[in-house]
Amino acid sequence: MPKFYRKYNPQKHNIISECRISNIPCEIFIDICRYIPPIDLVTLSKVCKKFRRWLVAPSSFGTEQIWRTSRSIFLPTLRSPPCGISEQCYVFLNLIELGCQFCSIGRIVSQGELPTEAPVKVYWMFRVRCCKNCFLERVITANQIKEEKYVLDVALSGVPYLVHINRPHVYWKKDVDAAIQEYSRIDKKDLVSWQNEKIRKLEKHNMITAFCNDTHHLKLLDKLRRKQRLKSIIRNLSTFVPNDANRTHLEVEVELRRCPTHKKYASSEVIKLFTEDHWNRFQEIIYSEYNAKREYAALRARQYELFLKVYSLIPSKYSMNDPIVQYLCHCPSFKKLPSHQDVITPWDNNFLDTEFIPLLAQEASNIARNNLRIPPITTVDGMKKLRLMNRCAFLCKLCIGISCNEGNEKKKTCLGLFDYKDLVLHLKIRHAVQKIVDKEMVAVDFLEIGKQYLKRNSYIVCFFFPLQNIPFRQ
């Protein structure tokens, strides 16, 4: 037999089969557990039978002391349990992050992704924390009991149940089975006293349940604590995130709160499941989303810079009929700038004139030669493809022609911009046009296309890179 298949002989190799830590005295174990969070106490109770006995003992002062100390230190907003329910049971059921106690669904991984929902619920009436599926599998209605078990109502006198409006009472199956067995062993002469005792215990049970269900005070404290933590994170981020436009800290904080992850969790109850690792991850995500918006704004500002550059070359180098003018928005290098170029760092004119503008001109020419080419952006069809028909970027060619013929330059420069719908009304009312011919009657302002298409009026772009601060070197 190969060596690595041989079995070890504990006596021969003097191997200690039990872990030494399990031999520590109970008093020392209690002192150690004072510094352990409740969720880790649950994990520790699964290490060995001795630890489980110490941590789950139903009527042990040491056990109560361990869980009480851990709760007061690590769950300060959680109230003390009412008389009649143990510390360990009370704390264990409140640990929603452990998920369903039967199938473990909804368990929150402390170092994993941010939790998105809490699919489990604590049913204090039955002293369980479980998901909906496990709950439905383990309960039975009063109607089902009558149909399947044929028991008298007196047998269920002391069994806890949930009440729903216009619905039959809901019982825990194990409680019903235990009550039926106990009822079958009761003598008739003791039935009344047995029933009274069960009713008294049920009333006490209901009082404890009502106390545990009253979480209004706890929710207020949790909400205040979460609000303070969120405020602290945003204030901290506002001091070191990039601030190209020299915004105030208050303005930066407002923009940070607009990040999708902050908006998602700021008013969500799921945030109460956050561990310290989750809070750190949350801060990293907010920082990343803020930078993503900044890069998007820089890209849009850089694209608008290219619009201005091309516009400045008309008519000295290009005409309105050149491909780079008609297809600039559709050039691959315009949509996604070269990876070796930082969108934040300004470019100089030499790079634009000798490298990038010629590259865009070549790409635009390729698009123009394509048989399936898209319509030029300087036409109505091109604006329709860009979904800019409702933007004020259209000019009336008839008004321009009249102004030019009259030689009134002032009137010409005062001609306003229309969206397409208003321009059609203008042509019909002002010029009495019956049939609109776009090619002959409608012009598109090239520079306005850049402003509208690149959303220069959007708060994101203007927040990071105001129009007067476009990274462009003259």
Image (cartoon, helix red, strand yellow):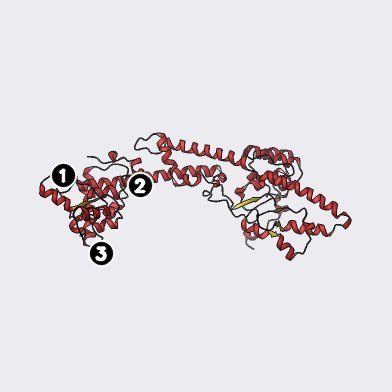
Q: Which mark is residue 372?
A: 3
Q: Secondary structure at mark 2?
A: helix
The residue closer to the viewer here, 26 or 71, is 71
Q: Amino acid at mark 1?
A: Lys
Say which quarter of the image contains residue 240. Answer: top left
Q: Which mark is residue 166?
A: none
Q: Which mark is residue 411?
A: 1
- Mark 3, mark 1: which one is toward the viewer? 1
Residue 363 place in picture, x, y as percent: 24, 56
Residue at x-position 63% and y-position 56%? 103
Is residue 428 something that shows in the picture? yes
Cα distance between the residues tagged 2 and 3:
30 Å
Q: Amino acid at mark 3?
A: Leu
Please state, as top left, top right, bottom left or bottom right, where the C terminus lies in the image.
Answer: top left
Residue 215 place in picture, x, y as percent: 63, 43
Q: Please rate how many residues cluster around mark 1, counting C-alpha atoms within 10 Å: few if below 14, some from 14 to 19, many from 20.
A: some
* Residue under pointer 2: 296
Q: Amino acid at mark 2?
A: Tyr
Cα distance between the residues tagged 1 and 2:
39 Å
The residue closer to the viewer here, 30 or 259, is 259
Say which quarter of the image contains residue 437. Answer: bottom left
Q: Secondary structure at mark 1?
A: helix
Looking at this view, name the residue that lies furthest to the right. 189
